[in-house]
């Protein structure tokens, strides 16, 4: 796969998480900047999102944040990004992030991250995009999701080709090997 120009990263907005997830977010931000890959993310200054953006910015990377006005007004927007787009709704946020990205990576996160993950997977399944999707399975965080997808296929709710919608990588360096 040729090098991509932009990567949309979905990840948690909580900072009360294990250090291994915090390190992964910071490492990914720094490595994207070093590789000249633009970061597209949810525009938040908190949790893994904030660490990801801060690390990319610290290395001189271009960082595009897309955030609904309601979250910006709650003082959650990262004001130091290269470009901050304010949108009306979460639906518009996800659509704009998808438009700006050449590929997607999913770091550990919560319900919002799952929402973004399933939406981008379903869009790919429906043929609305053909962009690569990478599940970054830091310390096996996403093992339950991978098992659920296996169960969905085994139970007949999805075709076996569903597994081809995303690529699982165990670490940030493994992700970068696929992107470069």
Image: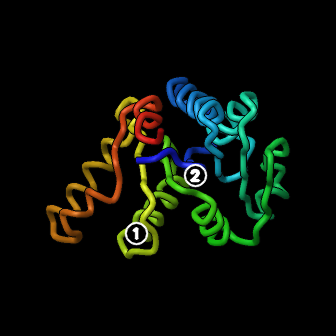
Percent x, y for residue 116? 52, 60
At horizontal 61% and vertical 42% (from top left) the residue drawn is 37
Percent x, y for residue 12? 57, 44
- Specify whether 101 is left or right of 50: left
Per the image, the residue denoted by label 2 is 8
Task: Identify the colour scheme used.
Answer: rainbow
Label 2 Cα neighbours within 10 Å, binned few <14 / some 14-19 / many ≥20:
many
Per the image, the residue denoted by label 1 is 122
Which one is in front in this view, the residue at disc 2 or the one at disc 1?
2
Percent x, y for residue 126? 38, 76
Q: Nearer the viewer, residue 120 or 179?
A: 179
Instruction: Work out how far the residue at label 2 is from the one at label 1, CA to CA, in angstroms.
Output: 16 Å
At horizontal 52% and vertical 27% (from top left) the residue drawn is 18
Asked which secondary structure carries label 1, the reply is helix
In this rendering, the answer to whether 117 lies above or below 128 is above
- Specify whether 178 is left or right of 34: left
């Amino acid at each position: 796969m040729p090098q991509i120009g932009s990567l949309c990263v979905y990840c948690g907005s909580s900072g009360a998480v294990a250090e291994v997830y915090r390190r992964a977010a910071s490492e990914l931000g720094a490595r994207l900047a070093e590789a000249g890959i633009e970061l597209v993310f949810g525009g938040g200054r908190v949790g893994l999102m904030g660490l990801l953006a801060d690390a990319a910015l610290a290395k001189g990377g271009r960082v595009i944040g897309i955030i609904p006005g309601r979250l910006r007004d709650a003082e959650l927007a990262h004001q130091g990004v290269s470009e901050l787009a304010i949108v009306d709704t979460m639906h518009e946020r996800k659509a704009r992030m998808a438009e700006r990205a050449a590929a997607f990576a999913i770091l550990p996160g919560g319900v919002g991250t799952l929402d973004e993950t399933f939406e981008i997977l379903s869009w790919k399944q429906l043929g609305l995009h053909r962009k690569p999707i990478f599940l970054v399975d830091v310390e096996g965080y996403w093992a339950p999701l991978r098992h659920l997808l296996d169960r969905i296929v085994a139970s007949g709710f999805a075709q076996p080709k569903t597994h081809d919608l995303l690529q699982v990588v165990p670490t940030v360096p493994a992700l970068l090997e696929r992107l470069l």
